[in-house]
Image (cartoon, grey):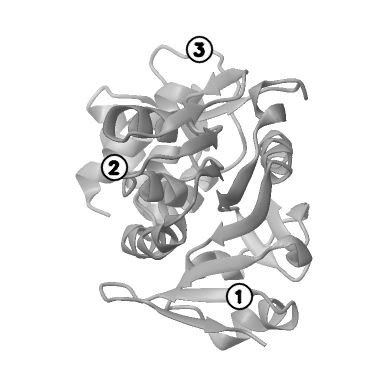
Amino acid sequence: MLERERHRLIVRLVNERAIVAIGDLVEMLDASEATIRRDIATLDRNGELRRVRGGAEALNPRFQPHLVGSPFLISREVQADQKRAIAAKAAELLDGCQSIVMNAGTTTFELARLMGDRDLDVLTNSFSIAAELFANSRCRVTVPGGAIYREHNIILSPFENDASANFAGEYIFTSCYGVSAAGLTETDPMIAQAARKLFNRAAKVVVLVDSRKLRLRSSMVIAPLEEIDILITDDGAAEEDMAAIRAADIEVRIAAVGEKGGLHKIA
């Protein structure tokens, strides 16, 4: 990531969260602690934020609840080529579909960007996906009620009774924080709850994860591997990272980055 792009993301994140720890920035931006410290010092000198012990603070801090995990804007920059290739492979499943569910995420957003010629009924809890489909497709879009969380571009509600209750999709396209032997995992309880609610609205579960997420672990399980019908990842997936998926007999589609991907069934 270029320095100017990193600076832009840091300032935006600090303004949204009011204060951010160095450790969080290191994880989100995949940069060294020394690099983040230099960035904060530069931005402090430029009058774009305030350097504080262990992190950075907005010049005009305000309280705003935020979710655990990387914000949408930052996640879009991570493994971007892989996500676009995975989305292209996922789009092959749309032929013949009438209705689908799309869980919030940057890979599912890339799928939405490929749906300009589609005419589908779509349920999504992603503000970004809803806006993209509304502006650039013929899809009929349904969103559940709730509050919009700007960082993650997601619509969340603590209530079970919302517009999603009467929707039926052929597939749900979803990503997650990571995939382990325990199943799909997330880091924030509200995001996990929202995903679980959408899982109940579709006949088949399609998981879109770049190969990096096959090595990430969290203790908050959204769904066991047995509930996954299809998993789409990129050709950077190592065989050892696929062991649990192999054991669960999940259909796997491999997206070759920069090329036309392949398809195989893990037995």
Q: Amino acid at mark 2?
A: Gly
**Mark 2 highlights which residue?**
116
Q: CA distance from mark 3 to mark 1?
A: 46 Å
Rate crowding at label 3 as few (under 14), some (14 to 19) or many (20 or more) other CA atoms within 10 Å: few
**Mark 1 highlights which residue?**
251
Q: Mark 3, mark 2: which one is toward the viewer? A: 2
* Left or right: where 126 falls relative to 39: right
Q: Nearer the viewer, residue 252 or 241?
A: 252
Q: Nearer the viewer, residue 24 or 185?
A: 185
**Mark 3 highlights which residue?**
62
Residue at 42% x, 21% y is 58
Is the C terminus in the top left, top right, bottom left or bottom right quadrant?
bottom right
> Residue 1: which disc?
none
- Mark 1 vs 2, N-terminal side: 2
Is the N terminus in the top left, top right, bottom left or bottom right quadrant?
bottom left
Residue at 52% x, 62% y is 209
Q: CA distance from mark 1 to mark 2?
A: 27 Å
Q: Position of residue 152 (x, y in %)?
A: 50, 34
